[in-house]
Image: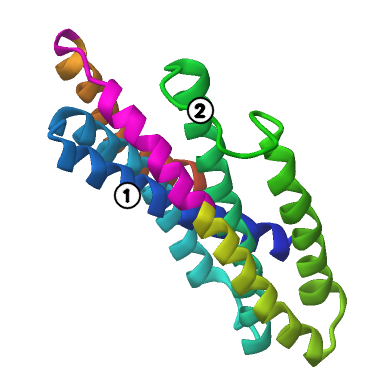
Amino acid sequence: MGSLRSLGEGFLFGAGLIWSFNIVSLFRSGDAWLALLYLMILSIPTSTFLYFRLKKTRTQAKVDGVEKYRSLLFSAQGVALAFWSFDILTTFYAINVTGLAVELNPLGWPLGILGAFSYYAPTLAFSYYLLFRSRETVSLYAAVPLALLTLAMGTMNLLAGAQNFQVFVDTAALATGVRFGLLAVVGTMCLSVPFALKRTFARPKLVLP
């Protein structure tokens, strides 16, 4: 269970980095309306993540330092998966939706996904074994270069996705007629999520007779 939590937190962290980069790219392109919408959407998963993170910090017992390092190293796999997903989604948009880009991978598109999957899948499984199945200290040390190599591969996907996202920046625009209505809907969601989380997960109070 701890491994899935670490993987999910790493994925959310990587997705947050990607989304922040997208916001900056949109602002630099001059599309402030779309950038503002992205920024407001980002606040929804961010507030959710922070809520559960703080709740976990208040309720969780003290964790051994070695276990923290294991979780941190495994979360690197989630970050890389987020970068890879960003590359896949932006490639689909640039090639299949707009038709303005071509695939440079020799395997072509979408077969190029299999090339990356052939690395990430066994790396994820091997990293899980080293960190959570093999309890030897040397396994923890062996997982460090594996995590760094995975982050390096993920960074390559991030850079490729950034190039593909530029196609979105050049082609996407928020229609004038729906700007205020869409922003109002997203703004309402941003304000309601913290209250909904607090109400849903608040501890029931003991009522004495």
Q: In this view, does 80 lie above or below 138?
A: above
Residue 150, by quadrant, is: bottom right
Check disc 1 and give the amino acid type.
Phe
Residue 39, by quadrant, is: top left
Task: Quote the CA–CA distance across marks 2 and 1.
Answer: 23 Å
Q: Is residue 166 above or below residue 180?
A: below
In magenta segment, residue 159: yes
Q: Where is residue 167 in the image (x, y as percent from the top left)?
A: 35, 29
| Residue position marked by numbered label 2 in the rendering | 102
Residue occupying image coordinates x 75% and y 60%: 124
Q: How many labels does the image show?
A: 2
- Residue bounds of the magenta highlight: 157-177
Give the mark toward the camera: 2 or 1.
2
Circle 2: element type:
loop
- Looking at the image, is mark 2 or mark 1 earlier in the sequence? 1
Which numbered circle lies on residue 125? Answer: none
Closest to the observer, 5 or 123 = 123
Q: Main secondary structure of the magenta part?
A: helix
| Residue position marked by numbered label 1 in the rendering | 21
Check disc 2 and give the amino acid type.
Val
Judge left or right: residue 181 versus residue 60.
left
On the question of residue 11 being in view, the answer is yes
Residue occupying image coordinates x 56% and y 65%: 152
Task: State the residue lying farthest toward the bottom.
Answer: 137
